[in-house]
Amino acid sequence: MKRIRIAVVGLGKIARDQHLPAIADNPAFELVATVSPHGDGVGGVPHFPALEELLADGPAVDAVALCTPPQVRHDLAALALERGVHVFLEKPPGATLAEVAALAGLAERSGATLFASWHSRFAPGVSAARGWLADRQLQRGSIRWREDVRKWHPGQAWIWEAGGLGVFDPGINALSILTEILPQPLFLCEALLEIPANKAAPIAAQLRFRDTAGAPVQMDLDWRQTGPQSWDIEIETDAGVLKLSDGGARLAYPGGAASGENREYAGLYAHFAALVERGESDVDVRPLTLVADAFLRGTRRTVEAFED
């Protein structure tokens, strides 16, 4: 198969820690350019300050991976899709649901692939969890997703702005797993969002969902946790309790267990390559829909200012 010539747009922490190594390790891809208004890119690869300049004067590209903040992602994705360039969207796929729907329509008309990625779905325990839960009756569920924002998002001011999601940036990872493994659809009942006095996005949230069969699911999000981090999902069923821990890396359930090396981004790029080869798109917005519902229906509480 011809290698997919890809450019990475946005060279922040996630691009350097995850995207660039995953591309380098996948023989289906060839990194031909990077794009960012800041810095000089990576050694030996042509670098451009703007996507327009790459598409006008740079090497030929088949695909772009958009690792920018979500607030600016739509216009970049639209520019690429209009030229027939395949687009990989880092999560969340956009700042609003409407813009992602518009991109999906544009991808269909252009014939290019659009992939709204959810890396936590490729954690080692997720697929087996989905299989085990498929024939079970859910009784209740709980999510505890607590981490230290200073460790994982140092100096990222955009994440505290409108559209940056705040604590839902990691929290949406849990929702991406939940919407993947539960046999019934999930919807929000109520939410409490704690927003620092000097920020526009929440630092913590308590949410209550239920599935369409009536089973309740509680969610606890907090960005102020120090020490050991918590990324745990527990699902009580008629056949016992299933637990995903370490963000889906470890799975335990009655009669079985699974764990493995974290190769989430390797899985994402393998899936993206397969989509491109088949001429298909994958744009699942269920996790973003639940977050949008939290902002739509949630009660807001102002808490003390937070300095990161």
Image (cartoon, grey):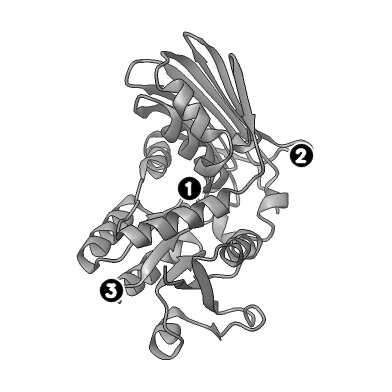
The kind of secondary structure element at disc 1 is: loop
Q: Position of residue 211 (x, y in %)?
A: 37, 22
Residue underneath mark 3: 82
Residue underneath mark 1: 118
Say which residue appears at 42% left-offset and 83% top-offset: 60
Q: Position of residue 141 (x, y in %)?
A: 50, 20
Name the image quarter holding residue 253. Answer: top right
The kind of secondary structure element at disc 3 is: helix
| Amino acid, disc 1 | Trp
Of the image marks 3 and 2, the number of the one nearer the N terminus = 3
Find out whether the residues at labels 3 and 1 contact each other: C-beta distance under 8 Å. no
- In the drawing, does residue 140 fall left or right of residue 184? right
Q: Nearer the viewer, mark 3 or mark 2?
A: 3
Asked whether residue 300 appears in the rendered view, the answer is no
Of 192 and 49, nearer the camera is 49
Q: Nearer the viewer, mark 2 or mark 1?
A: 1
Q: Position of residue 162 (x, y in %)?
A: 47, 55
Question: Alpha carbon of mark 2 to alpha carbon of mark 1: how far?
Answer: 25 Å
Say which residue appears at 62% left-offset and 79% top-offset: 41
